Image (spheres, helix red, strand yellow):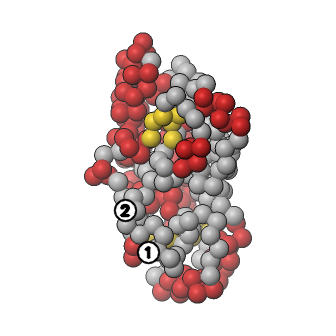
Amino acid sequence: MKLIVDEITGGSIEARSLLRPNDSPHTYTPTPADAVAAQHALTLVYVSPELDGWIAQIGSPHRIAAMGLLPESLRLKMPEDVLMEEDGHGHGHIDPHFWPDPAAVMEVAMPLALELGRLLPEKATAFADNAQALEGKLRALDAEIKAQFAGIAHRKVAVFHPSWLYFLRRYGLEVTAIIEPSPGKELSPRSMEAIINRLKETQTRILLTEPQLARGPVQAVADAAGVPVVEIDPLGGSIGATMYEDLMRKNAAVLQKALS
């Protein structure tokens, strides 16, 4: 969210991320310093209560939930046929991880610029112009990534956590299993067996994970199923990206290489 806000404001105001590199937005515990920062900020931009719900613990004079700016027609439901958790967590829920899809960010850019412009009317025109420029860059990025994945034959991907469903759908890749919709939940032996069988039966090519997740459970599943683990970063902390487009290009390149 910080990278997207930076592009819209053009760096004319300071955007500070409360999370450190490789912190998970699902499991983060806000600190007293976070509370102070939020209270003195112009606004607190977050994704949604379903993703970074700990935001509710922080008092802030103004908040913007980015997921609420995404048109309902573009919001994905968690796909029930590939959820592997026994308790059915996530069934029927809207997936809040919209930002890895450049086309979804394109739809959020102008509404977010308008929200920020209402808070700083003297900068509203500049914010809108920046959002329009960002839309153009995202359109080009989308076309670039589509071309990257157009000729890939092996398109079956499992994800340990569903951060990449919007991206995978956008570029025609097939999700065969979502292993851990709830971060940090330990897999039961029954679930583990079902997942391993699923990955083998579907001839899944790779298992996607993230630097924000513990590596041990991911590697155990992958080793048992004979599927390589590929790490891509939906947040950018491990990559050190300074622009949203750079983050997505680097992740797309890693994923394309793994599938090729």
Q: Residue at x 51, y 52 (%)?
A: 51
State whether residue 232 is above or below residue 125: below
26 and 7: which is toward the camera: 26
- Secondary structure type for disc 2: loop
Q: Residue at x 60, y 29 (%)?
A: 39
- Secondary structure type for disc 1: helix
State whether residue 254 is above or below residue 66: below
Q: Nearer the viewer, mark 1 or mark 2?
A: 2
For label 2, the crowd category at 10 Å Cα-Cα, with few meaning under 14, some 14 to 19 and many 20 or more, is: some
State whether residue 177 is above or below residue 211: below
Q: Residue at x 39, y 19 (%)?
A: 124
199 and 113: which is toward the camera: 113
Q: Is residue 199 visible?
A: no
At label 2, which amino acid type do we have?
Lys
Q: Which of the two discs, 1 and 2, labels the residue nearer the N terminus?
A: 2
Q: Which residue is mark 2?
A: 77
169 and 31: which is toward the camera: 31
Disc sitting over residue 82 in the figure: 1
Count of numbered tags: 2
Q: Residue 160 placed where, x, y %?
A: 57, 68
Q: Residue 27 placed where, x, y %?
A: 63, 55
